[in-house]
Image (cartoon, rainbow, N blue to C red):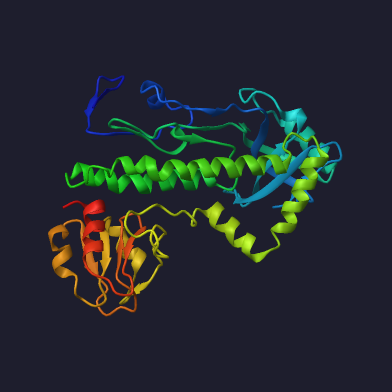
Amino acid sequence: MTATFANDHTIEARYVVAADGGHSTVRSLVRAEFPGRVGTSTTIAADVRLDGDVPTLTRTRSEDGYSAQVFPLGTDPQGRPLHRLALGGPKWSLSRDVPVTDDEIRDGLRSVFGERVRLLELRYARRITNVARQAAQYRHGRVFLAGDAAHVHLPIGAQGMNTGIGDALNLGWKLGAAVHNWAPEQLLDAYHTERHPVAAAVLRNVQAQSLLMDREGTNDPDVVAARDLFASLTQLREVQYHLDDMLSGMGIRYAMPGSDDRPLVGLPAPDLNIGTTRLHELLRSGRGILLDPADKLAELVAPRSDRVDRTGQGADTEPMLIRPDGYVCWTAGADYGTDELESSLAHWFGV
């Protein structure tokens, strides 16, 4: 593929990754479908210096439905505290293109906090919407969509950042395999297969959170009842674990052909001690890892020694094959042979 820039500089590449944001030019050029919901309301997100009785990390509501949440951002070069401020409610449901003013921030603070919190300085502000869109396909020939170019939603809990990083981690090693000419035929297609459901789940949970937050300030009694019920459920340890895995992305499980019934297969590898080194440090090589504690799988992995490292001799772990992105793609059963492992090696690392 060839790209020509304004200064007549031309770059030729076998593949292109569109990581150019929610208004992706590349996505438009390949005419990728981008279905979903347009934004129906906006919230102000602003970086500010505040004075007074400043609450942090708790959502504060006024009686007329306006809300504010304040997050600490450390200090500026002069050592003065900075905060991220989120303001929501009917008054601020304006087009995202309308500039945010100092007076608007002051009015918002006064609506929610009265005179307890005052604006000293507005450093940066923008309007964010509850848009929810996702590309129908992440691969278009030799072009791949990643990050906000592939999915956009209301930013809650840094899930968009985590999802975009996950896209890059998933796609990067697969493109590397293709560039080095050992990628199995289906490997690049697995990027869409694995990552599209992940972002779809994020969009669903963000839309649910947005509803429960009642960002438009309606104080709908049905929404209030649902929010109270959800808040009571979050007191259960099992629910906390589930939400933690969902929001952090650590609960993502990919389908791995041939051994999906094994507990660890498809999940991020545990950070084991391999001798004096942590497993995740070994993964920084960008290669796959075969843990071979019994030291009997050398011949099987030898043809792929340029892309898979064998280690873990004598380690207290079961045999395990781990992809370069840290996901387990095979583990040994109680009485394992080599056929399953050979099949998994071929599927993910070629022949």
Q: Residue at x 27, y 63 (%)?
A: 289
Quadrant containing the N terminus in the rendered view: top left
Residue 219: x %, y % from top left = 81, 38
Q: Quadrant of residue 43?
A: top right
232 left or right of 276?
right
| Residue 12 visible from this viewpoint | yes
Q: Is residue 243 above or below residue 110?
A: below
Question: In the depicted view, which residue is nearer to us: 322 or 261?
Answer: 261
Q: Position of residue 199 (x, y in %)?
A: 49, 42
Q: Is residue 48 visible?
A: no
Residue in the image at 25% along x and 19% along y: 8
Nearest to the observer: residue 17 or residue 332: 332
Is 106 positioned to the left or the right of 189 in the image? Answer: right
User: How far across and down, in percent of the image, does residue 191 sit?
Assistant: 35, 43
- Residue 254 in percent (x, y) is at 40, 52
Residue at horizontal 18%, vertical 47%?
Answer: 182
